[in-house]
Amino acid sequence: MEIYAFYAIAAVVLSSAVLMVTSRNLVHSIVYMVISFVAVGGLFILLEAEFVAAVQILVYAGGIVVLFLFVVMLVNVTETYQVEFLHRQWLPAAVLSLILATQIGFLVWGNAGDLSADPSASASVLRAVDGGNTETLGMMLYTDYLLPFEVASVLLLVAMIGAIYLSKKRV
Amino acid sequence: MATLGLNHYLLLSALLFGIGVAGVLMRRNVIMVLMCLELIFNAANINLVAVSRFRPDMTGQVFTIFTIAVAAAEVAIGLGLVIAMFRNSQTVNVDEIHLLKG
Amino acid sequence: MSPTLLTLVVFLPALGALAIALLFGKERENEIRWAANIILFADFILSLFLLRGFDFDTTELQGVTRMEWIPTIGVEYFTGIDGMSLALILLTTMLGTIACLSSWTYIGTRIKEYYVYLMILQTGMLGVFIAFDFFLFYMFWEIMLVPMYFLIAIWGGKNRMYAAIKLFLYTLAGSVLMLVGILALYFYNHSVTGEWTTNILAYYQLSIPSDLQWWAFLGFFLAFAIKVPMWPFHTWLPDAHVQAPTAGSVILAGVLLKMGTYGFVRLSLPILPEASIQFAPMIAILSIIAILYGGLVALMQKDWKSLVAYSSVSHMGFITLGIFALNPIGLQGAVIQMLNHGVSTSGLFLVVGLMYERMHTREIAAFSGLGKVMPVFATLFAIMALSSMGLPGLNGFIGEFLILIGSFEWNPVYTYWAVWGIVLGAAYLLWLFQRVMFGEVKDDKIAALNDLNLREIATLVPLAVLAVWMGLAPNAVLKTIEPPVNAIIERVHPGYFDGSDITPPPLPSIPGAQMAADTELEPVDEPLAALPQSLPQVLPIEG
Amino acid sequence: MLEYFWLIPLVPLVGVVVNGLFASRYIRSQLFTGVLASGCMLVAFAIGLGSFVQLAGMPAADRHVEIELYDWISTSLVHMHDNATGVSAAPFNVPFGLQFDPLSALMVLVVTGVGFLIHVYAIGYMKHDPPDKGFYRFFTYMNLFASFMLILVLGNSFAMMFIGWEGVGLCSFLLIGYYYQKKSAGDAAKKAFVANRVGDAGFLIGMFTIFFTFGTLDYDQVFAAAAANYQVGAGVITFATMMLLIGATGKSAQIPLYVWLPDAMEGPTPVSALIHAATMVTAGVYMVVRSNVLFSLSPATMTAVAVIGALTALMAASIAMVQNDIKRVLAYSTVSQLGYMFLACGVGAYAVGVFHLMTHAFFKALLFMAAGSVMHALHGELDMWKMGNLRKYMPITHKTFLVGTLAIAGVPGLAGFFSKDEILWNAWAGPNGAPWLWAVGTLVAGMTAFYMTRMLIMVFYGDSRMDEHTESHVHENPHVMTAPLVVLAILSIVGGYVGIPANLQIGPLAALHERVDIVRWLEPVTGGHSEATEDHGEADAHAMLPQSDTLVGPAVGGEAAQVVARAGDEPAIVLAAQETGGAEQEHAEDHTALEWTLMLISTTVALAGIGLAYQIYGRGKPVDEPAKRFGGLYSAMWNKYWVDELYNAVFVNRAKDLGRALWVFDDAVLDGTVNGVAEATKQSANASNEFDGRVIDGTVNGVANSVWSSSWVFRALQTGMVQNYALVIAIGAFVLVSAYLFL
């Protein structure tokens, strides 16, 4: 049963991604991007990573997208580039990326075969605590990964300051 | 119909990655390039979460959190740059920014 | 006496330097001056407390701090003091204080850096005296050099860069050779004992094959001979002294030069006894050359300061002669002469500095009749000069006297030569005194000079008092340095003290004119028999 | 008193401290400073006198007090020879010790007594100097000198003597250079100290030799051991005494180191009187007498001492005969008199040497101070040709000077006569004497009489050669200056009666002789053989044998007496044998006869000298006549035999040249080497830099250029477009992945 859900979501993700890359209108592609992000969030839920899913939705579908929208509005150049929106090297690029994707696909498909373990087997580990693994995640974040966590927060702070500074007038 | 395995997810992420790369390489618009980068990030995230699911270990998810944080930061800076760039040379066209030309 | 106190004494100046560097802005000059002086003076007072509870009879190290530092190569942080180190530490802290006080007005630019360097230098020097680990020793040895370089290179005279670089390269070359020697011993020690250690005391027990001793000694010798400086490695000294600021000269003459002799006593003799005996005659000859050469050259100097510099070449010659007489009295004389030279020559440099500050020249010909204008100055200068020329009742005499006795005990021939150094000392110092102090007051510039102020007196009086005290009651010092000295001699000359190997000097003799016919007089012919054996000693032995 | 004798050298230090520290700033009173300084000397004299009396009260054998104030130097073990018997190891210990024995006592009395008089005199003489400038400096130095001199004579070891030895040298430096504005004064001061230092070098070596021979520097132990373990002519003793002799010649201004004393007259006259006539310059004599045991053991040195003494006396007297500077005449006279003392010691008559030392201290101090008072009256005039007929103006000075002259000239009845006659007699017949020594001595006596009379006449008689201004101001000096003269004049008359020659011991003199006899007084120090013709000398020597086992002072005499006794058995070896021992008794009469003859001869010669001087200078004849009469000799004397020039040419200037040469060597060769090395390094650095620039960089740039020219294709890749780069990255990824896949 799960697998159908997977295929469905995967289809949404990929199609919306393709549309996003190919649509001429920036705003449209942003919308497609939102869709694909939300879909990815679905995948996460499917993978029993509720917390990550939530974060995915909040951060991407929430924050980042809003950011992009703002920028797009600040820089409204959409029309000018609808005519020729592709780079000169689009054809080789497309081909190359296609090949690359297939190669990687083969790679993982060939070697990950044995990894298709039964999800239920590992359930106990991931659900150390009842009611989702969020608590486990929290535990790990605030014990083992406390330092990286703080560093990450610092990183965000820096990014914020940097962003503010960059987007000020007269840089 | 086989059961849902890790390789499905990996394949998916591979494709998503490919699309992202294609976008990065093809589009002229800086903002677009940035968005495609986000796609690539997502591909990576999918990998992480999937592996942490099938090779039961929470670390993957933890790293996802970090990745997302980094992605957010990257976007913030990236867009900041875009704005700065646009203000300096009224363009968001990647081609027109080739100070690195040898 | 507690290890913590010792450590505090050594590192207080460095901490002070740090504090000054961090707490004071460049422009708060007077506060910096006060702070530096107070810290160094406090350091001096603290160092006096080392005396309390110091055991003067043991040869054991005292106040030992010992901890792992770099275990993989066997380096420890190993510090402690014995009588000799104690004496030198007291000298250093005192001279440091005086030097600091003396530069109150002399130094007008970049005050902050100056005092920081001065205090770092202080820690470096003190460190050398307490380090009993080769690594530590070498570290302090090199640390010392850097601030000295800057003191000369920044606050020096016209030709300062040349002098500073000369000093730096010269000493560095020497210490690199020392490093080679240390490494040779280090690996040899490992090959024998199988353990990596840089603990100096561990090497005292080592018995090293004589050829390795010879090479290692050569390495050490060059390092120390340059630092002392012995003839002919002395040429950096006059330049450095003439160019250095007063405080620099004071420290340089008072303490830095002692590093070389201290190294000889602390490392060369106990670790390489055979080679020391082998090299002794050559070094004695170099020392005698230094004594006479320094004296004669000093006689003809036109620059007040370089005269004092060459005089200290001559005096250091006495010290090395005493050390390599390789008998306790000579060594005691050498160590006490280190202190004396530290007191009197530093005093002379202070005197020159005071004059330079007033007249901005050091040319002897420019002075005349100072005695009339500045009586206090003249008196203090006289005391310093007299102590430096070894007048009985002042400190210089004790050192030179004991050293001469020591060299006489080794071989009278050396004494006959060295004794002329005393005559020369009187000649050049009194001639200097006569030229600058006596005579008519030449010009209004001199007539306008004002005598020493309280601060300047405060820099010189302690030295004068010390000179008199050490001249009249040297026993306090002699007793302090006796145990370590005896230990070292016992190591170089086993059986010296238990009487199993008594080797008195060949007595000089003139056959009696009329009555010497009696051949059965042993005092007559015994020395004659002994003299020829002694003569080969005079020639240097090529390894 | 005797237990406090160690205070004697300390008392003057009080004056030094008080005057030295406070006089310039706070006291500023000539009276206080002068009185304090002289007071210190008086107190010292009092203590000395008390101790002296007490000492005299003791039996001759144990007239020896010793005190060790504290441990001065004590070091670790030293290896030395153990009295010729073997080797031993002992610490080098020098206690700060003082001893009081007949010799020291006599010296103390001379130093403090004459010193006190001179201090008093100086109060008047120096009164022109401001109390807060020169005056206090002068008296501080004088007191310092006194205290060092007392340490010298009271010390109980050679090291202690050396303290005083160098200390008095220093004070003499300071006092000669007292008028430091005068360049000549400075030069003279330096010359004096350096010449002394040369002697001190010898002293040091001698001291070391003694230490390593006897294992100690303490007089008693050294002398006892020497007398006990060494025979006459021992080489090491000869060496040691020769070295000590060098020191003595330096301090006592004998050939070859006498040159500094005449120049030393640059100092104030009281200084000349105290230091360069009465006390310091006699230190050498004192040292020889003090270590007479060692000297007696070395005939070679004894001969050297005697010859040096005789020659110095002769040469100095001859120079003195032609000098015109009143103080220089006295200076050379001092040198010559010191030569007398050395002669006495050299022939083995140490006691007589001391005897002459004492009388000389009296009349030479007197003469100097009288000359000083003349100068003072004449505003510092020194040239005798600008004086004359002063007896009219300065009666007291004239009378005292007359006494002094007669005394030094050896006119019978005055101090000089006795001591000089004793010396001459011993020069002929003493243990080490020889007729030619006596001849020289007698000749010198004549010369002395001559130049002293010449001086007397030129200064006080004849018609005045002063200019009007001076003459109008000439006056006798105040009592503070004349009183000491009178006292010394009296001493110069009676001083001689403490040592009456054997042949004059008749009637009252004999009785007096039994009471006081300096020679007998000094015997505990100088030993029984100290004087040739003392008929009781041997008796005393034997009387002292019993204590010869103890290690204190008298024992030295005892040991010496043993030497004498040994001599009795084998007359071949020992010097003293000629006159003492059994042989002495029966020849007594001949001796008396011989002594009478010699005495008469010498007296006649002296009177002849006086007469000659009167002949030449007393008749108002043209004064440059002697110069005409014997030109070459005269100019040689006048130029002091060009010795100063010689020394300057041979030693001083050569030393300076050597210094200069070495300095050049230092700069050129040694420093040259260093800088050369540095320069070479720099050159090679430059060279390698060039190499870098030309060759290596050249290659690199060449390659770069070729690359540049051949790199259009790569340049084409370098579009500066981000996405091109991204594409390349992707290609890279592609390549990697395919590599992973297909390899």
Image: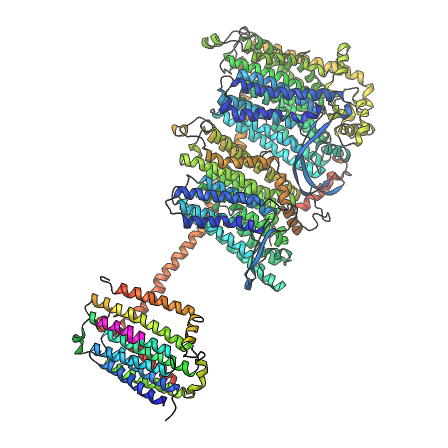
Q: Nearer the viewer, residue C236 or B80?
A: B80
Q: Is residue D226 magenta?
A: no
**Percent x, y for residue C22?**
41, 50
User: Which quadrant of the figure contains the C terminus of chain B?
Assistant: bottom left
Q: Which residues are magenta?
A: A58-72
Give left or right: position of D117 versus D657.
Answer: right
Q: Residue furthest front?
A: A131
Is residue D327 visible in the rendered structure shown here?
A: yes
**Percent x, y for residue D108?**
66, 23
Give left or right: position of D1 versus C170.
Answer: right
**Percent x, y for residue D98?**
68, 29
Q: Residue furthest bottom?
A: B1
Compared to D282, does A65 lie above or below?
below
Compared to D169, does D420 lie above or below?
above
**Residue for point 50% across, 27% down:** D186
Query: In the figure, residue D504 lies in which quadrant?
Result: top right
User: What secondary structure characterizes most of the magenta part?
Assistant: helix
**Residue for point 56% across, 45% down:** C88
Query: In the figure, residue A75 lies in which quadrant?
Result: bottom left
Is residue D254 visible in the rendered structure shown here?
A: no
How many numbered marks, from 0 up? 0
Q: Nearer the viewer, residue D276 or C41?
A: C41
